[in-house]
Image: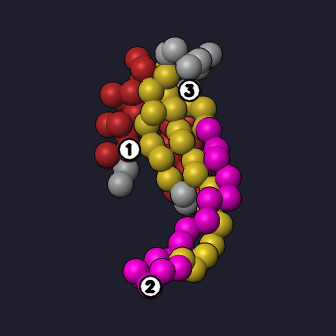
């Protein structure tokens, strides 16, 4: 079981596809993970003209693994870029 005390942040992405790729890799190598999501951040385009233009809403995905599995998980992600 992964808790706040034994976990380490492995990856942050705003891409649903990238999040799925990482999850599939971790599952294939029997590495336990959890995902924390924070939803619907507005990405803005600010060009120094005094206003911002909302471009699209995004969801942030944070992927955590157990501290003891962190090095193995990083190695797996590096090998599968």
Compared to 22, does 2 lie above or below? Answer: above
Q: Are marks 1 and 2 in contact (CB under 8 Å)?
A: no
Q: Earlier in the sequence, mark 1 or mark 2?
A: 2
Q: Earlier in the sequence, mark 3 or mark 2?
A: 3
Q: Which residue is mark 2?
A: 49
Quarter of the image for residue 23 reads top right
- Residue lying at the far front of the rendered structure: 50
User: Camera-side residue: 51 or 30?
Assistant: 51
Label 1: how many Cα within 10 Å (few below 14, some 14–19, many 20+): some
Dot 3: element: loop
Dot 1: element: helix
- Residue lying at the far bottom of the rendered structure: 49
| Span highlighted in magenta in the image | 36-51
Q: Which residue is mark 1?
A: 77
Q: Is residue 48 magenta?
A: yes
Quarter of the N terminus within the rendering: top right
User: Camera-side residue: 39 or 20?
Assistant: 39
Q: Which residue is mark 3?
A: 32
Q: Residue at x 32, y 37 (%)?
A: 75
């Amino acid at each position: 079981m992964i808790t706040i005390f034994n976990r380490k942040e492995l990856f942050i992405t705003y891409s649903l596809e990238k999040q799925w790729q990482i999850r599939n890799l971790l599952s294939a190598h029997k590495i336990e993970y959890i995902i924390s999501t924070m939803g619907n951040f507005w990405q803005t385009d600010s060009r120094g003209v005094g206003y911002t233009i909302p471009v699209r809403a995004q969801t942030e995905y944070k992927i955590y693994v157990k501290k003891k599995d962190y090095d193995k998980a990083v190695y797996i992600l590096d090998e599968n870029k």
